[in-house]
Amino acid sequence: MRENISILWVEDSKSYYEEAKDILEMHAEDKGIKVNFKYVENAFSLLEELDKQVQGFQIHDICFIDYALSMPDNKTGENIIRELRQKKVGADILFYSSENIATIRETIKQDLSSFEGVYVADRDTFEDKSKLLLNKNSKKLYSINNIRGILMNETSENDYIMKSYILKEYSTLSDEQKEEITNIIKEKISNKASDIDDISKKLLKRIEDKHFLEAKKILSIANDLLGLKDRYEILEKIIEYKSVSDVESGKIDNYLNKLVDLRNKLAHRKLEICNSCQYVLHYNDIDDYEQKHCCNECDDNCVHTEDNKICVEDWNNLKKELIEFGQSMDKLL
């Protein structure tokens, strides 16, 4: 799953849903946000989805609910509000309707006791209110835990696709192409021969005795012998053989040298947000922290060394690059 924000949308007019969704997707893309929409046509499916969340992990961050549902099970908006009172729903909820907005607000006040996390819009203001909720939820993408999480999630998805593509397409290559890839692997492992143990040297000897390896054997080689960049180089070679243009060489280099490098830094370092809220700071160890940590007088001109800070603008650009590269990888499967 790549999405940053998940929206559950109940609306009995599929055409209205499609039109409104397209507008929100364009807004999300402009903000560097990946959104997953789940569409349901009736209140029964809505409540079933929310029940799953109450009992388990949270799937949906926002719910858009057409108040005037015309359903055979008589689950009108008023009934839904009453049922929501019995559930501890963590998602933001936006009820919308073309009429009776005052009645909806009064029902919400009586049955949910508070407007916190519950919003109301008419059809004319739905676009503005839905964007407001999207922007509100997107702020979580700027918390420390979610910055780590987004990097880990996106890069893990890409690694899964890389391995899956190698497994799927390697067998379709000619023997000559397989042999060329095997020779690349032999050379990479041989270059590390002085630093590897006896078990690894035996593995190298077995590889040298073969004309070419099978895909599963390649992917089972230890990371210290065949690293992540090496595996992406194999992916790139297969893409070249298959004449696939979705993932360009320059994009892979940028991804590995910038985005994966950042992932490796932030996954294993102490993080904090500076007092000006303009930078995420990362520290390698206690000495690094004591030299560079954010001081109490920190302001909008927060001064730190360039190698341990990420500003908001940089993070926005990095998110967009992650999404764009992920979309190109998704096309491989």
Image (spheres, grey):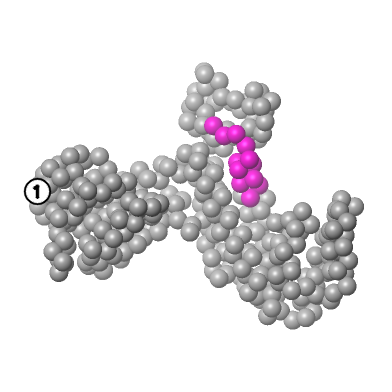
In this rendered view, identify the residue nearer to me: 83 or 32: 83
Q: Is residue 329 above or below residue 6?
A: below
Residue flagged by tag 1: what amino acid is it?
A: Thr
Q: Secondary structure at mark 1?
A: helix
Q: Is residue 160 above or below residue 176?
A: above
Work out whether residue 218 can be spotted.
yes
Residue 240 occupies quadrant:
bottom right
Prevailing secondary structure class for the magenta stretch in the rendered image:
helix
Residue 305 in percent (x, y) is at 64, 29
Work out whether residue 191 can be spotted.
no
Residue 71 forms part of the magenta stretch: no
Residue sitting at the far top: 297
Residue 265 forms part of the magenta stretch: yes
Range of residues picked out in magenta: 260-272
Q: Which residue is mark 1?
A: 103
Q: Residue at x 14, y 59 (%)?
A: 76
Residue 139 in percent (x, y) is at 41, 42
Residue 81 in percent (x, y) is at 18, 51
Looking at the image, residue 161 sits to the left or right of residue 7; the answer is right
Residue sitting at the far front: 55
Q: Residue at x 40, y 46 (%)?
A: 138
Q: Residue at x 65, y 75 (%)?
A: 169
Residue 22 occupies quadrant:
bottom left
